[in-house]
Image (cartoon, rainbow, N blue to C red):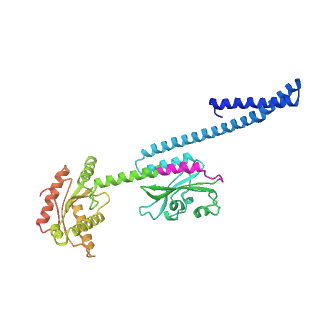
């Protein structure tokens, strides 16, 4: 009931008119003191029946509505607080594993009685695999869906609730787990606009997930996808800033940073400079597209013959540089010999014009500064070219 003065005036007017009507009725029915008693009784009953009881019912209904509104506001406030905590936690995650820990932890905190798991697609986006699960759960009991297209939630693009695993419209992957769970909630995960996974929750007890549960988990999924997208974009940006766009090898600045770390740790290393022989002639004869293809083929073959710990750099044009930790100049020369064999095999399909490689090697026993080692390796490379190309010269202290 409104507390404004027009409503109060109407209420008072209603009571006055009701009592006047009761007075008229009493005087018509009785006389003398009987009329007074009758008036009082009829007025009391009328006011109680037509005003007090409806008013009480109305006020109770208003109180219930206000209480429900307060409950909804409190629930919304709690949800917003929880979501802000999730956002802050995800902002502190430095990689995908950290973001996964936050997301699965948030689900466990929000719905402690549910079993939660996150399934993400691989790089080909053709297969789904469980990458995180709430503690104390066996991965062998996880959802059996193995590809994104087989997941109903991923296909539909929105959260799906299944109140009963044995229902006609229950997820087929849930039905085969009827002994393990009674209800489920599946929320698709979107990263950079593409659905690449699903956040899957199940319960053993028959209590189904609510709309509020779905809203809460969807918020976690959305924030997780946003963070993973940002981390991916940052990683791609860092990769682009540190690598040569044509070959994917390190650029000169990134190589120098990595070598500085080797020097600071006292690790010995070998340095190799390689140059593609007569590359200008190859470009002029077959065109720049063939030249670019030759550089990519050379980079791919080079990756295949070195160790994972070796540093590969496109030093400029057709010149490449390798830094090999815990290796000598002689060890490096052996690697280049294997490179020549692999390179010859790479030309067998005829798609790339054949070319040879000259190389010069040295190691950190010959000088302390990286720039000086590069100069020594370059001097050895010039000797290899002067000696007829397609060969490797190892710099020695006597050179």
Q: Quick check: 43 left or right of 148?
A: right
Residue 204: x %, y % from top left: 63, 54
**Between 191 and 70, the one nearer to me in the picture:** 70
Let me know if residue 385 appears in the view: yes
Chief SS of the magenta region: helix
Q: Is residue 214 magenta?
A: yes
What residue is drawn where x is 59% and y is 42%?
A: 72
Residue 26 sits in quarter: top right
Picture quarter with the C terminus: bottom left
User: Looking at the picture, how far across and down is residue 280, in whole percent?
Assistant: 15, 67
Q: Residue at 87%, 31% (x, y): give it.
A: 29
Image spot of residue 383 (x, y percent): 12, 63
Residue 134, placed above or below residue 342: above
The answer to if 349 sits in the magenta stretch is no
Quarter of the picture containing the N terminus is top right
Q: Position of residue 389 (x, y in %)?
A: 15, 68
Q: Is residue 374 above or below residue 62?
A: below
Quarter of the figure with residue 379: bottom left
- The answer to whether residue 145 is left or right of residue 341 is right
């Amino acid at each position: 009931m409104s507390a404004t003065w027009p409503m109060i005036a109407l209420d008072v007017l209603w009571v006055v008119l009701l009592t006047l009507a009761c007075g008229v009725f009493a005087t018509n029915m009785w006389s003398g003191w009987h009329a007074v008693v009758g008036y009082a009784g009829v007025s009391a009953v009328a006011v109680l029946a037509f005003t007090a009881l409806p008013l009480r019912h109305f006020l109770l209904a208003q109180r219930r509505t206000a209480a429900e509104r307060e409950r909804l506001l409190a629930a919304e406030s709690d949800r917003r607080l929880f979501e802000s905590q999730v956002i802050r936690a995800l902002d502190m995650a430095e990689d995908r594993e950290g973001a996964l820990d936050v997301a699965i932890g948030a689900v466990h905190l929000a719905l402690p009685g549910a079993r939660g798991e996150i399934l993400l697609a691989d790089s080909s986006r053709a297969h789904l695999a469980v990458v995180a699960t709430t503690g104390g759960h066996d991965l062998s009991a996880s959802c059996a869906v193995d590809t994104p297209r087989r997941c109903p939630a991923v296909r539909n693009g929105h959260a799906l609730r299944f109140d009963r695993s044995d229902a006609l419209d229950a997820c087929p992957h849930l039905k085969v787990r009827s002994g393990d769970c009674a209800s489920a909630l599946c929320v698709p995960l979107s990263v950079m606009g593409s659905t690449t996974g699903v956040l899957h929750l199940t319960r053993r007890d028959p209590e189904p997930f609510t709309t509020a549960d779905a809203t809460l988990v969807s918020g976690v999924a959305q924030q997780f996808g946003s963070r993973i997208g940002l981390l991916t974009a940052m990683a791609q940006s860092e990769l682009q800033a540190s690598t040569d766009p044509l070959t994917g090898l390190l650029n000169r600045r990134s190589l120098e940073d990595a070598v500085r770390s080797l020097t600071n740790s006292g690790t010995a290393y070998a340095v190799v400079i390689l140059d593609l022989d007569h590359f200008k002639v190859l470009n002029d004869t077959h065109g720049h597209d063939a030249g670019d293809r030759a550089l990519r083929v050379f980079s791919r073959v080079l990756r295949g013959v070195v160790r994972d710990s070796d540093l590969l750099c496109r030093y400029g044009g057709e010149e490449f540089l390798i830094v090999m930790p815990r290796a000598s100049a002689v060890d490096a020369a052996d690697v280049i010999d294997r490179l020549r064999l692999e390179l010859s095999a790479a030309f067998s399909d005829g798609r790339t014009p054949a070319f040879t490689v000259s190389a010069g090697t040295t190691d950190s026993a010959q000088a302390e500064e990286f720039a000086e080692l590069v100069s020594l390796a370059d001097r050895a490379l010039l000797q290899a070219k002067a000696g007829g190309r397609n060969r490797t010269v190892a710099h020695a202290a006597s050179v």
